[in-house]
Amino acid sequence: MTETKKIKVTLAKSLIGCIEKHRACARGLGLRHREHTVEVLDTPENRGMINKISYLLKVED
């Protein structure tokens, strides 16, 4: 069984004043509030959302 790679993502900045599509990306990643950390699978879909809102996030591999 192969292990799937995960990425640790933390919401570093607030979503207040952000574009609605960027808020939707944060919600899609499972981020709820500032300094909330989640682990997501390393898929092209998640990478795209991370790249779109990279200015709001801290990302660890």
Image (cartoon, rainbow, N blue to C red):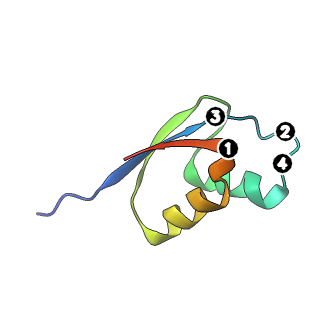
| Front of the two marks 2 and 1 | 1
Residue 9 circle label = none
Q: For the residues labelled 4 and 1, say whether their Cβ atoms are less than 8 Å apart.
A: yes
Give how far across and how far down residue 50 sits, in percent.
57, 56
The residue shown at (15%, 63%) is 2
Q: Is residue 52 above or below residue 58?
A: below
For marks 4 and 1, the one nearer the N-term is 4
| Residue 36, picture quadrant | top right
The residue to which callout 4 is attached is: 18
| Front of the two marks 3 and 2 | 3
Q: Amino acid under label 1?
A: Leu
Quadrant for the N terminus in the image: bottom left
With 35 as the anchor, is 21 left or right in this view? right
Q: Amino acid under label 3?
A: Ala
The residue to which callout 2 is attached is: 16
For marks 4 and 3, the one nearer the N-term is 3
For marks 1 and 3, the one nearer the N-term is 3
Q: For the residues labelled 1 and 3, say whether their Cβ atoms are less than 8 Å apart.
A: yes
Q: CA distance from mark 4 to mark 1?
A: 10 Å
Give how far across and how far down residue 41 sits, in percent.
39, 57
Give how far across and how far down residue 30 sits, in percent.
57, 47
Q: CA distance from mark 3 to mark 2?
A: 12 Å
Q: For the residues labelled 4 and 3, say whether their Cβ atoms are less than 8 Å apart.
A: no
Q: Secondary structure at mark 2?
A: loop
Q: Amino acid under label 4?
A: Cys
The residue to which callout 1 is attached is: 56
Q: CA distance from mark 2 to mark 4?
A: 6 Å
Q: For the residues labelled 3 and 2, say whether their Cβ atoms are less than 8 Å apart.
A: no
Q: For the residues labelled 2 and 4, say whether their Cβ atoms are less than 8 Å apart.
A: yes
Crowdedness of circle 3 by 10 Å Cα count: few (<14), some, many (20+)? some
Q: For the residues labelled 2 and 1, say whether their Cβ atoms are less than 8 Å apart.
A: no
Q: Is residue 45 above or below residue 60?
A: below
